[in-house]
Image (cartoon, rainbow, N blue to C red):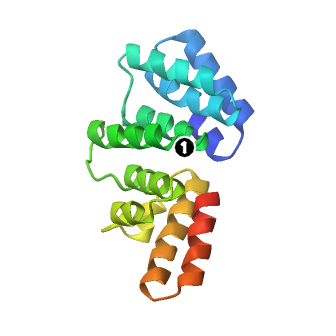
Amino acid sequence: MGYVLLKRERVTEAAEFFRQALDRNPDHPLALAAYPLVLGYEGRFIEARAMLDRAAAAGALTAEAYLTMGKLALLYGRYAEAEGCFLNALRTGNRPDDPIAMAHLARTYAAAGDREKARRSLEGFTREELLADPDEANARGYALLRDGEALAAAGGAAEAARAYGQARDA
């Protein structure tokens, strides 16, 4: 339910849902992995990081928790940290080529200015796979990044630059 509330941008309600879950069970793995994302949206990065450290101590650092950590790091422009988190998400997840984690990784590379790494990260994935991310803003960014690649390949440098810029800002 908390993730549904987040997807609908009902951050306050999602925060309350995760707080209640943690009040009932301080080691609740889903809440430990998701509540830091809410804290990040609220600009409480230090608390979010502390919560993720708690998740690690409780053995709850799943691929989803690493994705959360990476999203927070990306939000604050900590690209090397975000890259490490997304790579860990790939290592601990069910698929070493998970399109969502790869798309986050590509967005990190693009935000850091490494378009070639971003392009290589997205090779082999369809636009639909990249749009499967429940976070619609991220999905839009990935789709724009792919559009930029296609435009660049077709020789539309100005259009590609615009799409890359929109992907970075999405």
Q: Nearer the viewer, residue 84 or 93?
A: 84
Residue in the picture at 56% in, 10% down? 24
**Does 47 sit above or below residue 121?**
above
**Does 41 sit above or below residue 139?**
above
In the rendered image, residue 58, in percent from the top left (x then y), is placed at: 39, 14
167 relative to 42 in the view: left or right: left
**Does 128 sit above or below residue 16?**
below
Crowd around label 1: few <14 · some 14–19 · many ≥20 (10 Å): many
Q: Nearer the viewer, residue 49 or 38?
A: 49
* Number of numbered callouts drawn: 1
Position of the N terminus by quadrant = top right
The amino acid type of the residue labelled 1 equals Leu
Residue 169 can be seen in this image: yes
- Residue sitting at the far front: 113
In the rendered image, residue 19, in percent from the top left (x then y), is placed at: 63, 19
Residue in the picture at 70% in, 32% down? 43
Residue 28 can be seen in this image: no
Place residue 16 in its image quadrant.
top right
Residue in the picture at 60% in, 42% down? 75
Q: Which residue is mark 1?
A: 74
- Residue sitting at the far bottom: 155
Q: Secondary structure at mark 1?
A: helix
Residue in the picture at 63% in, 17% down? 20
Place residue 21 in its image quadrant.
top right
Position of the C terminus by quadrant = bottom right
**Does 80 sit above or below residue 43?**
below
In the rendered image, residue 3, in percent from the top left (x then y), is placed at: 57, 38
In the rendered image, residue 52, in percent from the top left (x then y), is placed at: 49, 23
